[in-house]
Image: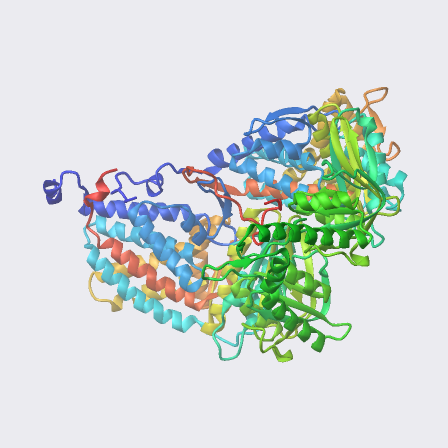
Amino acid sequence: MAAHVPVAPGYLQMLKQGARYYSGLEEVVHRNIEACKQLSHCLRTSYGPNGLNKLVINHLEKIFVTGDAALILRELVVEHPAAKMLVMATQAQEQEIGDGTNFVLILAGSLLENAEELLKLGLSVSEITEGYKVASNKALELLENLSCLSLKDIRDVTEVAAATKPSLASKQYGYEDFLATLVAKSCVSAIPKSGEFSAESIRICKIIGASVEDSVMLEGMVFKRETEGTVNSVQDAKVAVYTCAFDSAKPETKGTVLLKSAGEFMDFRKGEEALMESHVRDIAEAGVNVVVVGAKIGDLALHYADKYKLMVVKMTSRNDLRRLCKALGATPLLSLTPPTEDELGSCSKVYLQEAGNTQVVIFKQNQECPMSTILLRGSTDRLLDNIEEAVNDAVSTYNTLIRDPRLVPGAGATEMQLAVKIADFGQSVPGLEQYAIHAYSKSLQSITRALADNSGTQTNPVMSKLYSLHQQGESSAGVSADGEGTDLIDASEAGILDPLLLKHWGIKLASEAAITVLGVDQIIIAKKSGGPKPRGENPNWDVPHDAIDN
Amino acid sequence: MSAIKALNPKAEVARAQAALAVNISAARGLQDVLKSNLGPKGTMKMLVSGAGDIKLTKDGNVLLHEMQIQHPTASLIAKVATAQDDITGDGTTSNVLIIGELLKQADLYVSEGLHPRIIAEGFEAAKEKALQVLEQVKVTKEMDRETLINVARTSLRTKVHVELADLLTEAVVDAVLSIRQPNEPIDLFMVEIMEMKHKTDSDTVLIRGLVLDHGARHPDMKKRVEDAYILTCNVSLEYEKTEVTSGFFYKSADEREKLVKAERKFIEERVKKIIELKKAVCGDSKGFVVINQKGIDPFSLDSLAKEGIVALRRAKRRNMERLSLACGGIAMNSVDDLTPECLGHAGLVFEHTLGEEKFTFIEQCSNPRSVTLLVKGPNKHTLTQIKDAVRDGLRAVKNAIEDGSVVSGGGAFEVAVADALIKHKPNVKGRAQLGVQAFADALLIIPKVLAQNSGYDPQETLVKLQTEYKESGQLVGVNLSTGEPMVAGEVGVWDNYGVKKQLLHSCTVIASNILLVDEIMRAGMSSLKG
């Protein structure tokens, strides 16, 4: 592309055609704020137990009906650069904590909204960001003292259930008690003695049909597959896991069978069969009665497996195979050799079951097991997807609590308390930052306000009542979600508690995002390049794709 | 109509005054864009690439690279400025600002009828003098840790926010100090910059060892090894197809089985040698880690895992070099002559999993000569921003060590030079004096913009600086938190000597070049289609 001799001087002439350039308060800061405001307003109605759902149709025309902010944002594919930065902040929250995405978005959106008013009053951007920085540091410091309870025993089902309930309630209001017990049971059963919990150890298997209350927790693993052979159920199973094909071994170099006569051909077939049989027999004689295979299964091998009463299960995902090994205590084998005693995995019962219209293979452990599976039932795919998201968030909450067991009052109480304290603190700060600190306090209140709005209460009277209660030191007064009787409840008495770390990261990330958006004074947008989007870096560049079928 | 139009009616052309106007406006346009970036109080720019990726930056170099400048003059300036970054690692923004200002000052005189050539001569004379001043004011001293920290801080604070800059400063200086070898040039590639999308920017740390962005690929390998021998090698531990076309011929299943075994035999031999070495050097307590540049197939991984060896495959080539510097030992190209002397040692090797990604930390090396700066941040644009800053910080420290001297920053140097040039003016013959005057005025753009970006009145601040300089004779720069003069050296605001020198050279050359252009034309056949 050759350069033209420029005609009129000006900034845009310098850039490639199609590029856009914005600068200054009016063009950049206000526009950015506007975009972020729109986004956070859009998701504000989904916050809390009474939040509404959104119907999102993504670029693949898949339909989602959900209230989960992380999911909505993921499917929405936000393009505006400033709004995208808020989305990034929520993604960071999702990675750190796994919950509280909407909290980050609303807080950041509200911080920007309040900043806009201050800008209109004539404050400069740097004064506002300075004030926000001071206020967010203060908020994090104050937050440390707000913890009202901490999870004493991470292995106690009732305590864990109580702690994960608010997270579930904000997504699946109505089922929270049932689901919380389910999640608590599976988390407690899956946490190893060392206490190093990984959210990976809780698997979710969704099967359509029946109702949510029919969901169960199983110690062990469940796969939506059928068994390969004829054996469908084995008690006290000894399991051998193979990552190679359950077939005769093939060399890497191309092999050709060199036959000279029909007789040789017959012999070759027979030899082949005899060899396969001996392999399978060796495996069966080693005490194995279930074979799990992570690759192709040959017909001949399957025939002999049936003959020796071996149950054969095929796995299509390498990760599933790895988790199963963990659950059964087995070592994956790379070639079709009989396993030694300690390479064998054991399982109380392996069986095929029909749930709804789906066949599932269940590996059930009666003794302690590092993996547990929640078998979710429900009437529609959407419902199942939503419950899955909710359960995942609850499991992350548990994971967060293991890192830091402290809990703070939920139901908007913590935000309100911080807002009150920061407003007080703001009074004592000299200089123009004071305004920004007040705006920060107002933004914190907007979280509580969103809860109240969504619960259908009369927001303004409720907010003012709450504010005065908090000023009198009722640090755990919050907004009631069920709309019966009073509008206010004592969150810590009602057992509505959130992990402290969730709020900590939420406040940190939201403030940072808002400050970054405010700190931008010029935007240069290159012309959108055509063609497919560049692919992101593949983190697992040195492994083949997950599916090992070939 | 110009002659070229008669020859080629499609040609585009700008002549004489028009050409100069185009050039000067381009330079000033670019200057306007970058002006708000200068100094610790500069603002951020948001860049959105064609694919929609966001980049936030204050770094002039990054900005010029990403802006896709099409204007010929502007891109000429941008190229010079980025070349400045390639050579010295800093000073891009100052470069653009000074070029713009030189042209602006020249424009004043040209519009009064002065020939551009005379101004260019004046610039040349001024540059000579400025370089002499630079030699006089530079401070040559022992590059101890404290001085280096000051230099790094001055550079980093202009790239990222203060808290982060202070954190990075220490990390960057310690990184360079640990890889520095007496009487050898510093190879900054021996500082690995690894990014992790995790936590916040203030969790960025210096690891005295190496961090690899992949992990062991076998579920049974240990996630944590203490007191470990490290074997770095470049030996394929997987089956590789022959280069010539080959095939097996067999008659029965038994034969095939044997062929399968034979095929793997020579790989197994290699694995065995490694295992033997492990058995020879390690007692019960010591660990053994193999880091291979080539692949390791599942069978080999399995046999290594059974012996308690942690094996990483497909390491970066550069990491092999870094590994032998960090842990000692020699990178082996064959397993035939393995001896215990080839092994390196690390106190701690562990794997850290972050969602899908795995990282392997090799730490507690005794006397590491290669270190890693682990950059952390919640999202991609923060990571890129820190990475760019770190790179500049490292360069600044390296420059300081190699120059052996530093120059006062914060606009102090520019004020001193401008003052010296004014005094020097009468010694220059003829109208070239005007060029010298223009040069002196142009340099003052740096303290002016510094003051402006911090919200102070540029003229007022400048006058204060000049008065203070005249009275005290000390090198005074702008104190950005008060707007008052300060003695730059006392508060530790030091710039690189090399950067300033390069700056004076390149600005003068490019400004003179642009001034002397009197016709811009575009008349190639192929280029006129569009």
Residue A526: x and y, percent? Answer: 42, 40
Give above or below for B454 relative to A167: below
Q: Quadrant of the N terminus of chain B?
A: top left
Residue A491: x and y, percent? Answer: 84, 33
Tag count: 0
Residue A117 vs residue B314, the one in the foreground: B314
Give above or below for A435 relative to A339: above
Residue B259: x and y, percent? Answer: 59, 61
Residue B347: x and y, percent? Answer: 70, 70
Q: Quadrant of residue B272?
A: bottom right
Give above or below for B234 relative to A217: below
Colouring of the image: rainbow
Q: Can residue A96 be seen from the camera position used here?
A: no
Give above or below for A511 relative to B475: above
Residue A199 vs residue A36, the one in the foreground: A199
Q: Quadrant of residue A183?
A: top right
Q: Is residue B24 left or right of residue A98?
A: left
Q: Quadrant of the C terminus of chain B?
A: top left
Residue B428 vs residue B392, the one in the foreground: B392
Q: Can residue A190 be seen from the camera position used here?
A: yes
Look at 59% across and 52% down and name the residue there. Answer: A263
Q: Is residue B395 left or right of residue A220?
A: left
Q: Is residue B448 left or right of residue A145?
A: left
Look at 88% across and 44% down and name the residue there. Answer: A366
Residue A430 vs residue A492, the one in the foreground: A492
Look at 13% across and 41% down and name the residue there. Answer: B8
